[in-house]
Image (cartoon, rainbow, N blue to C red):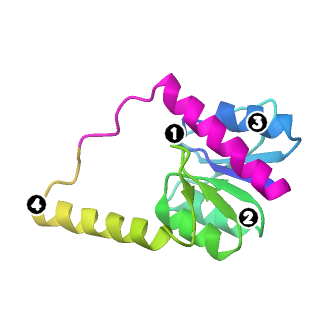
Amino acid sequence: MKIYVDADACPVVSIVEQVAEKYKIEVMLLCDTNHVLNSDYSEVKIIGAGADAVDFALINLCKKNDIVVTQDYGVAAMALGKGAYAIHQSGRWYTDENIDQLLMKRHLGKKERRASRKNHLKGPKKRTEEDDVKFCQSFEKLIKSILL
């Protein structure tokens, strides 16, 4: 098992690394040239800038039973298709049971923005310490469920 993080602007990288180190699981952080990262624990893979370049590199690398940390529903769907596990930075697990609904929600939102000509909506709410605790607990629970 290996953990792959869609690390461009990902707020939970340090939590992923702490939990992964506890369970001695390798981590690879993937980012584009606009979000260069450094890590004492994880392998960092810098992918050339380009639309979805990091997403496709991550999917090409992940395998069955790996874990993918991403906020991108499309990446999560492709990871699930390869037999990997996927988790959102909120701590929500992506599953075969919920991914179609999430993808449809994304599609309808995009369609609505196009119709109203609003390309930029208000961003996500500010991340709290409670959000980090929730992610950590959910992430560790996911790892334990895979290792059992």
Can residue 134 be seen by looking at this rendering? Answer: yes
- The percent coordinates of residue 66 (x first, y second) are 76, 60
Residue 124 inside the magenta-drawn segment? yes
Disc 4: which residue: 116
First of labels 2, 1 by sequence position? 1
Amino acid under disc 2? Cys
- The percent coordinates of residue 33 (x first, y second) are 58, 45
Can residue 45 be seen by looking at this rendering? Answer: no
Q: Nearer the viewer, mark 3 or mark 1?
A: 3
Relative to 122, say whether 68 is above or below.
Answer: below
Q: Quadrant of residue 117?
A: bottom left
The CA distance from mark 2 to mark 1 is: 20 Å
Residue at disc 3, secondary structure: helix
Residue 76 inside the magenta-drawn segment? no
Disc 2: which residue: 62
Amino acid under disc 4? Ser
The CA distance from mark 2 to mark 3 is: 19 Å
Residue at disc 2, secondary structure: loop
In this rendering, position of residue 75 left or right of residue 146? left
| Circle on res. 9 | 1
The CA distance from mark 4 to mark 3 is: 42 Å
First of labels 2, 3 by sequence position? 3
In this rendering, position of residue 26 left or right of residue 32? right
Marks 4 and 3 close (CB-CB < 8 Å): no
Residue appearing at x 26%, y 68% in the figure = 108
Disc 3: which residue: 19
- The percent coordinates of residue 49 (x first, y second) are 53, 53
Q: Residue furthest left?
A: 116
Provide the residue span drawn in magenta.
Answer: 122-148
